[in-house]
Every structure is written in structure tokens, then in C-alpha cells.
Image (spheres, rainbow, N blue to C red):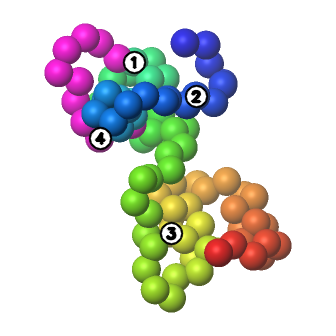
Amino acid sequence: MSTNRPRSASADRGAGKTTTVEILEGFRRATAGEISVFGSDPCHAPTSARERIGIVLQEGCRRAGIDGPSVLAFYAGYYRAPRPWTRRLRGSVTLS
């Protein structure tokens, strides 16, 4: 695939969409074949490569009393150096 382009997947239930994304993220090992994301196996990728991957989980942290900016801060906390715009975004929009 070419780089720097968003991707989407559409298929019937059970076709392997979630499994494929989990393999690309490094949360699951491939059982056959080879995969490389940013030049390395996602399961063994260095932190610098993992920080370049953006994901949106199927099940987020939707809990009573947590507002959008708090969710944004929570996910930004996964990164050693969150993007500078996350602070500005938290203060400038209403997320719900």
C-alpha cells in the first residue's frame, strides 16, 4: 500500500477486519505471512514507530462523568510527547 493515506475496511461480519487492524497495531500476532509497519514487525516495533500509529478503539472509555476533553487527555497520555495541538483542542472545542 502507498503511505500517508487513510484506509478503511468494509466486509461481512467475521471476515477478519478487526483481526487485521489488531495485527497492524501490534496487539495480535499474525498466524501466517509477514507484515511490516514503518519498517518493522508491529509486535516488536520501537516506541517511536508505535507513536506514529493513530487508532480509534471499538470500545472506548465511555464512563459516566467523563467528558470529551478528558477522553482526549487520556489518549494523549499514551504518547511520550503528545502533539502540541491536543492542549489547544481541549481548550477550544466542546466534545461530547
* Position of residue 92 in the picture relative to residue 78 (left or right): right
Q: Residue furthest right?
A: 92
Mark 3 neighbour class, 10 Å CA radius: few under 14, some 14 to 19, many 20 or more: few
Return the mark for residue 7.
Answer: 2
Instruction: Assess whether mark 3 and mark 2 are in contact (beta carbons under 8 angstroms).
Output: no
* Of callouts 3 and 4, the N-terminal one: 4
Provide the residue designation for mark 4: 27
Provide the residue designation for mark 1: 36
Q: Is residue 72 above or below residue 64?
A: above
Residue at 75% over, 58% down: 85
* Position of residue 2 in the picture relative to residue 12 (left or right): right
- Residue type, mark 4 in image: Phe
Residue in the foreground of this view, choosing between 14 and 65: 14
- Residue type, mark 3 in image: Phe
* Of callouts 2 and 1, the N-terminal one: 2
Q: Is any part of residue 53 visible from this angle?
A: yes
Q: Is any part of residue 45 visible from this angle?
A: no
User: Could you tell me residue 55's position as x and y percent?
Assistant: 50, 46
Look at the image and give the residue range highlighted in magenta: 25-35
| Residue 83, picture quadrant | bottom right
| Residue 47, picture quadrant | top left
Residue at 66% over, 25% down: 5
* Of callouts 4 and 2, the N-terminal one: 2
Q: Residue furthest left?
A: 31
* Of callouts 3 and 1, the N-terminal one: 1
Provide the residue designation for mark 3: 74
- Element carrying mark 4: loop
- Residue type, mark 1 in image: Ser
Mark 1 neighbour class, 10 Å CA radius: few under 14, some 14 to 19, many 20 or more: few
User: Could you tell me residue 53's position as x and y percent?
Assistant: 51, 39
Quadrant showing the C terminus: bottom right
Residue at mark 4 to residue at mark 2: CA–CA distance? 18 Å
